[in-house]
Amino acid sequence: LLGEISVTATVATVMEAGPGVSPFTVYRPLTATNADLRVAYTLMGTAFWAIRKYLRTEKGKIWFDKKLLVTPLLGTYMQKVIFARFCQTLGILMTNGVPVLDSMNLVAKTVSNKIVEADINIARDRVKEGSKLAESLMTSKWFPAMVIQMINVGEQTGKVGESLEQVAEYYDEEVETATAALTSVIEPILLVFLAGAVGTILIAMYLPIFRMYRGMMKR
């Protein structure tokens, strides 16, 4: 596509310049433009490679996961997904008799978020020291109050697993609702973006032709 636009622009420029001008004279600025584009593409590719490499590091993953939790709309959605997974996995493990420390070790690896994973590991260490699970999770700024309250009720009744499974069902419904809402917001944005992209391409393709036509009419 860029090649077609470049050729069209070259032809249009030569025709507008008139018969007394050499094509090579006209082509020089276009060659410089192509060189600038190559430099721009190289810089963009290098930046993309550097960002991708950074996000693969531990520090980069932590930064990305934290930004993911606080991003408007998407952050709320991701929190619901994470805690639905946390409650479901931990509830199933504890209902089936897996010790709480072992369960937390496994759950920390399934939430797929470094920030929440770190908070789970901190809570696990406090449980290991003798604290209750609900009390240990209170120090986290990410865990919802409802999850902590249900765990507290479960610890008092001896049914932590069942309490967590109930919360998991609630979050599953919330995730479905949030998915529908997020989709309804994203679709119009994508349509506007695609329309803008198509319009830009059409303008780039036909503008040289219009200019050529205008030049011919002036003659």
Image: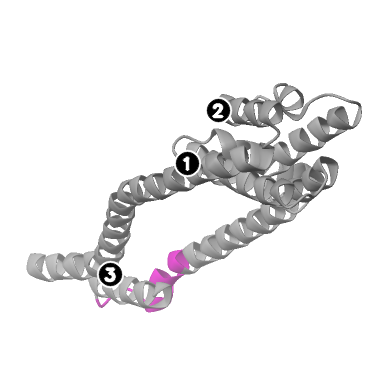
Q: CA distance from mark 1 to mark 3?
A: 53 Å
Badge 1: residue crowd in 10 Å (few <14, some 14–19, many ≥20)? few
Name the quarter where the N terminus is drawn.
Answer: bottom left
Tell me whether the residue at label 1 lies in contact with that at label 2, contact meaning CB atoms closer than 8 angstroms: yes
Cα distance between the residues tagged 3 and 2: 57 Å
Query: What residue is shown with label 1?
Result: 170
Q: Secondary structure at mark 3?
A: helix
Q: Is 5 covered by the magenta stretch?
A: no
Segment colored magenta: 19-30
Q: Which mark is residue 146?
A: 2
Residue 114 horizontal side relative to residue 184, left or right: right
Q: Amino acid at mark 2?
A: Met
Mark 3 or 2: the one toward you: 2
Q: Residues within 10 Å of mark 2 (few under 14, many from 20)?
A: few
Q: Which residue is mark 3?
A: 205
Residue type marked 3: Met
